[in-house]
Amino acid sequence: MKKSLILLAGYPATGKTYLANKIIERHPGCFAYITPDDMKEQVWDEVGFNDADDKAAVELLIWKRFYSGLAIYMEDERPIISDYPFSDKQKASLIELSERYGYSVLTVRLVGDPEIIYKRSLSRDLDPSRHLGHLVTRYHRGDVLEDRSKADGLVTMDILIDRCKHKGYDKFQLGELIEVDATDVKKIDYPALLDKIDAFLAKDGE
């Protein structure tokens, strides 16, 4: 398989991780899988943060670790999948890495009705399995919050819509693009979508 970077981008709570697993299942043992959210949760558990400013400072460490991880996989010429609501903040670094290591890039951008997607995002955030660090401005490993609806960093509908508008989640693209309406994830034709991704992987490949 050619040196490929697949970026599963777009709005939060649109099934990016589910799609990543579908791709990996179709190509067992081929892809390295690395995500900024996994990095965030690791670093939050390691060092924690005491307020919003501290959390923002820790974010810099997170992204440094993420890009370093990408570079390691690229040095090994592994095909890579990453999922995140990518924006222009990450674009320059991703371009630099993909060009340095000669990677072909595909963006699968999952979008949809922000109001419906917000309800799904809120349900995910309130689930106890969701890492608490996503919801609060102070966190250290072992912290718990019984009533997650009282989290001081919980994303509201207005915040989500503002982020989608100003961060350009619905416009992010690197390399080739496949756009998917994920308003209702049950209506996504995953076999057809996976075939489109395979067509990208086969292009100019072995």
Image: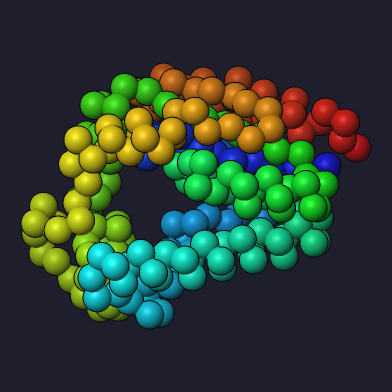
Image-quadrant location for residue 40 = bottom left
Q: Residue at x 45, y 28 (%)?
A: 170
| Colouring used for the render | rainbow
Horizontal placement of 148 versus 206: left or right? Answer: left
Compared with 12, 94 (above or below) is: below
The one of 166 and 171 positioned closer to us in this rendering: 166
The one of 48 and 61 positioned closer to us in this rendering: 61
Q: Which residue sits furthest right?
A: 206
Q: Is residue 118 visible?
A: yes
Q: What percent of the width, then of the height, locates residue 184?
A: 35, 23
Q: Residue at x 10, y 64 (%)?
A: 146
Q: Which quadrant of the figure contains the C terminus?
A: top right
Q: What percent of the width, then of the height, locates residue 19?
A: 52, 38
The one of 124 and 97 positioned closer to us in this rendering: 97
Compared with 154, 131 (above or below) is: below
Count of picture labels: 0
Horizontal placement of 41 versus 141: left or right? Answer: right
Image-quadrant location for residue 111 = top left
Horizontal placement of 32 versus 58: left or right? Answer: right
Compared with 42, 191 (above or below) is: above
Q: What percent of the width, then of the height, locates residue 28?
A: 69, 48
Q: Which quadrant of the figure contains the N terminus?
A: top right
Q: Residue at x 38, y 80 (%)?
A: 47
Q: Is residue 123 visible?
A: no
Q: Residue at x 22, y 62 (%)?
A: 136
Q: What percent of the width, then of the height, locates residue 64?
A: 56, 66
